[in-house]
Image: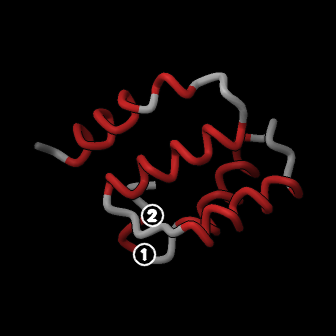
Amino acid sequence: MQQSDTVRDAIERFEHLRGQGTLMNLVAFGRVLKEAGIQTSLGRMIDAARALEFVNIGSRPDFHIALRSNLVSRKEEISLF
């Protein structure tokens, strides 16, 4: 199975959480990242949630960099993210 298939499968498993609010979506996203091989942790997820308080979540680039800077720790994880 290719990595893109793994990510797609993980996303589909958490599809039922759509529309449940930002925090629930962030938790589901953390699970998808773990399944994709990104080494995230509860502490990093909390930091990511806190970071979102300080960015315009309507700005895709700001939202993306706030999450990536908190959830990605290894260079090889950047392409997965």
**Residue closer to the observer: 66 or 61:** 66
Q: Residues within 10 Å of mark 1 (few under 14, many from 20)?
A: few
Q: Position of residue 69 (x, y in %)?
A: 63, 68
Q: Amino acid at mark 2?
A: Ile
Q: Quadrant of residue 49?
A: bottom right
Quadrant of the rendering where the N terminus is positioned = top left
Q: How is the image coloured?
A: secondary structure
**Residue at (65, 22) in percent of width and height:** 19
Which residue is denoted by mark 1 in the rendering? 75
- Secondary element under disc 1, as helix, strand or loop, is helix
Classify 10 Å Cα crowding around label 2: few (below 14), some (14-19), many (20 and above): few
The disc labelled 1 sits on which kind of residue?
Lys
The residue lying furthest to the left in this view is 1
Q: Tell me if label 2 and label 1 are in contact, CB under 8 Å.
A: yes
Left or right placement of residue 56 versus residue 17 in this view:
right
x and y percentages locating residue 67 in the rendered image: 64, 57
Decide if residue 4 is on the left or right side of residue 23: left
Question: In which image quadrant can residue 47 be found?
Answer: bottom right
Tell me where residue 30 appears, x and y as whole percent: 51, 53
Would residue 55 be found to the left or right of residue 4 on screen? right
Residue positioned 61% across, 46% down in the render:
26
Which of the numbered marks, if any, corresponds to residue 11? Answer: none
Q: Nearer the viewer, residue 10 or 66?
A: 10
Please state the horizontal and vertical placement of residue 33, each as a whole percent of the image.
42, 54
| Residue 79 position (above or below residue 11) | below
Q: Which mark is residue 78?
A: 2
SS state under label 2: loop
Which residue shows up at 34% across the image and 38% down it?
Answer: 10
Q: Is residue 54 above or below residue 76?
A: above
Q: CA distance from mark 2 to mark 1?
A: 6 Å
* Residue at point 28%, 34% (across, down): 9
The answer to which of 61 and 25 lies nearer the viewer is 25
